Image (tube, grey):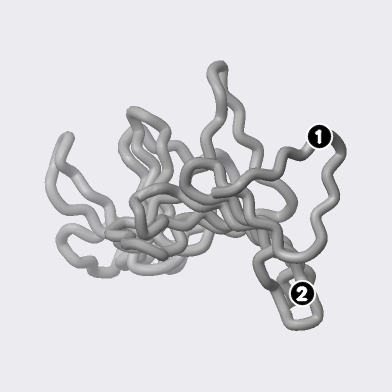
Amino acid sequence: QVDGTGTVGNITKWSSTNVIADSIMAETGSGANALVTASGSLKTTGELTSVGNFEVGSSMFTVDRLTGNADVHGTLQTGRQILLTSTLYPVLRGQHSGAGAGDFLFSIEAQSDATVYSQIMTIQGSDGKGIVDIRTRKSAGVTSSVRIEGEGDLIVSGTGTFAGNVTVGTG
């Protein structure tokens, strides 16, 4: 004989050898529109497969089932490297929505603990052209060392050493 009660829509579980009760899972809808909701944590010891889009935390992390594209709305942290592969050419793109003149568009930083030692930054110039700013750590902190502006103007802060011919002209 089986005893116990359950809630309509909840998936049952055995709470003892002869008693059923509600599990943490509930089902709503039916067929292709069925949705199973778990009110607790899930742990799988095998493969987790989804034939639909995969979403975590109200679109904070989403993987599109058709394209494989992943959207991360926060910090993506990886242990050692990010590998970009493609049959064409890989692209690492920073897109600053609504950026204006002087705004940083993209930055690559190298640091140890909380100390930044070097940066490569791209900046939207006031003339609508791009700026690449290479910064290095000096006694006063991280400051601009080499900057390429607009039409290719090269600005070196400090002593410049060039291995080749240098032509000096007026601007």
Front residue of 170 and 15: 170
Q: For the residues carrying marks 2 and 1, which lies nearer the camera in this image?
A: 1
Q: Position of residue 120 (x, y in %)?
A: 63, 55
Q: In this view, does 92 lie above or below 141?
A: above
Q: In which quarter of the image is residue 139?
A: bottom right
Q: Which amino acid does label 2 sit on?
A: Asp
Front residue of 87 and 161: 161
**Quick check: 106 left or right of 99?**
right
Q: Let me know if residue 1 appears in the view.
A: no
**Residue at x 12%, y 48% (from the top left corner):** 29
Q: Where is residue 55 in the image (x, y as percent from the top left)?
A: 35, 51
Picture quarter with the N terminus = bottom left
Residue, far bottom: 140
Q: Let me know if residue 89 appears in the view.
A: yes
Q: Residues within 10 Å of mark 2 (few under 14, many from 20)?
A: few
Q: Which amino acid does label 1 sit on?
A: Asn
| Mark 2–mark 1 distance (CA, rounded to whole Å) | 40 Å
Q: Position of residue 161 (x, y in %)?
A: 85, 50
**Residue at x 22%, y 53% (from the top left corner):** 27
SS at mark 1? loop
**Quick check: 23 left or right of 32?**
right
**Residue at x 47%, y 59% (from the top left corner):** 42
In the image, which disc is placed on residue 165? 1
Asked if the residues shown at circle 2 and circle 1 are in contact, with their CB atoms under 8 angstroms apart, the answer is: no
Residue picked out by circle 2: 113
